[in-house]
């Protein structure tokens, strides 16, 4: 389990009770691990076996999970999509942004993403990708690494300083080396935002992919943050193209959507 998932599970457990434990079970699933056995769920959540299987029975009855008898695995069910539908429906930025995102994706031959974050959770809510793109398309709703991506660092840089420091403090307990790396990367990210209007990641998550990202508020007065990102294969880039071409285009996209949202 990655550091961001560990922090999310720790946060969910603070509320105590069955709800927090049920959330921890649901958070154990990811696009990389869409199905898990009971043994794997025990390892991921740290829950006692009797508690876990009571929760699994409840979640299956609510159609949030389902059990596959052929391989002994649990997996997310259609009920989770129903829970996510109201969130996606109210984020009008998706409708405003998709056309410009697709135009930029076609021009750069790269994926352009839109993330939505609150507290320490940041997930993909819209994705545009050129038909010529050779990179792997991330899954809608999948969690974005706050530490190792341009999108995550743009999000953290836009948070109030106390919240940003709280994330670093928690990360330092679970992964001191990652926290130390992130501390220096965030200093650079904040300088990049001040100078260019976007953050840069040159291969920290995938050495063959370089990325830029731009944060903006989801809505006036909201505590949610949106982040536009564009990740380009390094072999597709000319020298300095990320800084002088891709980044400025993404800033223009973000500012145009921001103006359209008022």
Image: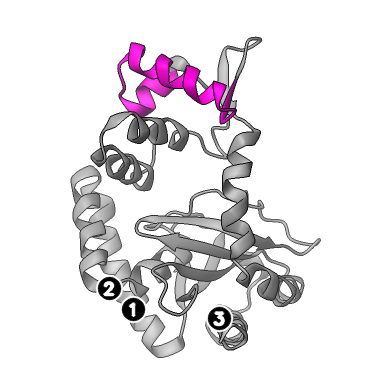
Find out whether residue 52 is within the magenta segment.
yes
Q: Is residue 18 left or right of residue 204?
A: left
Q: What colouring does the structure picture have?
A: one colour
Residue 258 picture quarter: bottom right
Residue 162 picture quarter: bottom left
Q: Magenta residues?
A: 40-66
In the rendered view, would you say 137 is above or below 13? below
Of badges 3 and 2, the one in the foreground is 2
* Category of crowding for the residue at label 3, using alpha-carbon neighbours closer than 10 angstroms: few (below 14), some (14–19), many (at least 20): many
Residue 201 in picture, x, y percent from top left: 46, 67
For residue 233, say whether it is visible.
no
In the rendered view, would you say 194 is above or below 56? below
Q: Is residue 24 left or right of residue 81?
A: left
Q: Are marks 1 and 2 in contact (CB under 8 Å)?
A: no
Residue located beneath label 1 in the image: 190
Q: Secondary structure at mark 1?
A: helix
Q: Is residue 229 left or right of residue 38?
A: right
Q: Which mark is residue 160?
A: 2
Q: Secondary structure at mark 2?
A: loop
State the residue lying farthest toward the right: 131
Disc 1 from disc 3: Cα separation: 15 Å
Disc 1 from disc 2: Cα separation: 12 Å
Residue 47 in picture, x, y percent from top left: 31, 22
Q: Is residue 86 left or right of residue 185?
A: right
| Quadrant in the picture for the N terminus | top left
Q: Nearer the viewer, residue 172 or 210?
A: 172
Question: Mark 2 or mark 1, which is nearer the start of the sequence?
Answer: 2
* Category of crowding for the residue at label 1, using alpha-carbon neighbours closer than 10 angstroms: few (below 14), some (14–19), many (at least 20): some
Residue 119 in picture, x, y percent from top left: 35, 59
Residue located beneath label 3 in the image: 247
């Amino acid at each position: 389990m990655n550091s961001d998932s560990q922090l999310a599970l720790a946060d969910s457990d603070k509320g105590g009770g069955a709800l927090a434990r049920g959330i921890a079970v649901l958070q154990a699933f990811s696009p990389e691990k869409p199905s898990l056995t009971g043994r794997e769920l025990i390892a991921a959540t740290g829950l006692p076996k009797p508690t876990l299987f009571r929760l699994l029975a409840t979640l299956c009855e609510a159609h949030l999970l389902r059990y596959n008898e052929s391989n002994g695995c649990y997996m997310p069910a259609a009920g989770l999509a129903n829970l996510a539908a109201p969130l996606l429906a109210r984020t009008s930025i998706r409708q405003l942004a998709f056309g410009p995102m697709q135009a930029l994706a076609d021009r750069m031959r790269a994926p352009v993403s839109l993330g939505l974050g609150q507290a320490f959770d940041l997930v993909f809510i819209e994705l545009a990708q050129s038909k010529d793109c050779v990179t792997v398309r991330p899954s809608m709703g999948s969690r974005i690494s706050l530490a190792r991506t341009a999108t995550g660092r743009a999000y953290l840089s836009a948070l109030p300083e106390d919240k940003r420091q709280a994330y670093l403090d928690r990360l330092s307990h679970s992964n001191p080396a990652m926290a130390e790396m992130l501390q220096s990367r965030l200093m650079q990210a904040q300088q990049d935002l001040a100078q260019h209007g976007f953050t840069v990641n040159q291969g920290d998550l995938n050495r063959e992919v370089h990325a830029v990202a731009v944060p903006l508020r989801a809505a006036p007065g909201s505590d949610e943050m949106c982040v536009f990102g564009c990740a380009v294969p390094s072999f597709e880039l000319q020298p300095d193209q990320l800084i002088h071409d891709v980044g400025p285009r993404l800033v223009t996209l973000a500012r145009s959507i921001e103006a359209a949202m008022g």
